[in-house]
Image (tube, grey):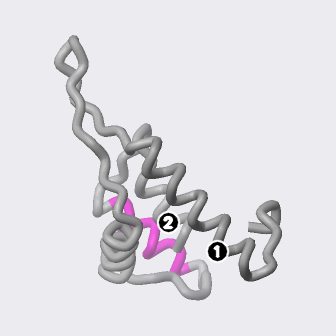
Amino acid sequence: MYILDLLDSMPQLRLSGAVMKSILWALNKLDVPNVPSFRQLRSTQKALAQKIEISPRRHESTMGNIFYQNSLEALLALVSKVLDSHKSSGVEPHHI
């Protein structure tokens, strides 16, 4: 599911719902195990977005272009939290 979410979230390559459904269909036809349904993928993405609590901020450039940017502070705090939780469980950061 991670790779599917990564593909779906790339800002340089926005995939439509129809394209993502086609990818899921192809993965199923290739007998790839544990392929989620489109609904399951969207549900998981929504749940993760709420759990992580990092929401992109809308910006407008001087030329009028709209773009979204995550807070660097929030991302660093999340990475620190993940590393701390893995450190306490005995997992080395380079194994994550």
Compared to residue 19, the image places residue 31 above or below, namely: below
Q: Which residue is mark 1?
A: 85
Is 84 left or right of 4, judged from the image as shown?
right
Identify the secondary structure beneath mark 2: helix
The crowding category of the residue bearing disc 2, from other C-alpha atoms within 10 Å (few below 14, some 14 to 19, many at least 20), is some
**Magenta stretch mostly in which secondary structure?**
helix
* Residue 63, above or below 26: above
- Measured in 3D between alpha carbons, the distance from the residue under mark 2 to the one under mark 1, in whole angstroms, is 25 Å
**Residue nearer the viewer, 77 or 55:** 77
Disc 2 + disc 1, Cβ < 8 Å: no
**Looking at the picture, which amino acid does disc 1 mark?**
Ser
**38 above or below 78?**
below
The residue to which callout 2 is attached is 4
At horizontal 58% and vertical 58% (from top left) the residue drawn is 79
In the image, taking residue 91 as reference, residue 60 lies left or right, namely: left
Tell me where the magenta segment starts and ends, as one range.
19-29
Residue at x 61%, y 81% (from the top left corner): 32
Instruction: Please tell me in which quadrant of the rendered image residue 86 appears.
Output: bottom right
Which numbered disc flags the more N-terminal residue, 2 or 1?
Answer: 2
Q: Which mark is residue 66?
A: none
Q: Disc 2 marks which amino acid?
A: Leu
Q: Write the residue at 51% across / 82% down.
A: 35
Near-viewer residue (5 or 67): 67
In the figure, is residue 5 to the left or right of 33?
left
| Element type where label 1 sits in the image | helix
Split into 4 quadrants, where in the image is the C terminus? Answer: bottom right
Residue 8 location (% of width, % of height): 42, 57
Q: Does residue 24 belong to the magenta stretch?
A: yes
